[in-house]
Image (tube, rainbow, N blue to C red):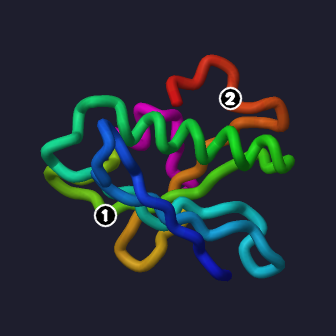
Amino acid sequence: MVPWYRAVVADGAVVGFVMLAEADAGTPVPYLWRLLVDRSHQRRGIGRQVVARVVDGLAARGHTALLVSWASGPGGPEPFYRGLGFEPTGERDGDETVARLEFGHHGRRGDSQV
């Protein structure tokens, strides 16, 4: 698995990054490895837009799902990812909860808020 990463730019400034592990023989579902938006730029919908673009790109290549994981606790990203439609799979990645977003071949999942 070789992840790629991209800068997240808003208003002409780099405000974060996204890192994705593409699907391969050992990882059949793409994995959103990291998403970071600087605290001063959060709550503007930037993270939601980044995930939407990732999902759209994956769907265009025939993927139907995306995995992510998070550490639970105060200030953690669980509410963000659940708000996008990610559902825990019951699996763990170390101390983190693994969750999955189903979105189908035709783009984002139904009325998903992504």
Q: Is residue 65 left or right of residue 38?
A: right
For the magenta stretch, what is the residue range? 79-89
Q: Nearer the viewer, residue 12 or 112?
A: 12
Give the distance between the C-alpha atoms of the residues marked 1 and 2, in whole angstroms. Answer: 25 Å
Q: Residue at x 59, y 40 (%)?
A: 53
Which mark is on residue 109? 2
Total count of labels = 2
Assess whether residue 84 is covered by the magenta stretch.
yes
Q: Is residue 77 left or right of residue 85?
A: left
**Residue 79 visible, this orientation:** no
Q: Nearer the viewer, residue 53 or 76?
A: 53
Bin the neighbour count of mark 2 within 10 Å (Cα to Cα): few under 14, some 14-19, many 20 and up. Answer: some
Q: Position of residue 4 (x, y in %)?
A: 58, 71
Q: Position of residue 114 (x, y in %)?
A: 52, 30
**Sequence-earlier tag: 1 or 2:** 1
Assess whether residue 1 is covered by the magenta stretch.
no
Residue labelled with disc 1: 71
Q: Residue at x 32, y 43 (%)?
A: 12
Q: Residue at x 59, y 50 (%)?
A: 100
Q: Is residue 10 left or right of residue 25?
A: left
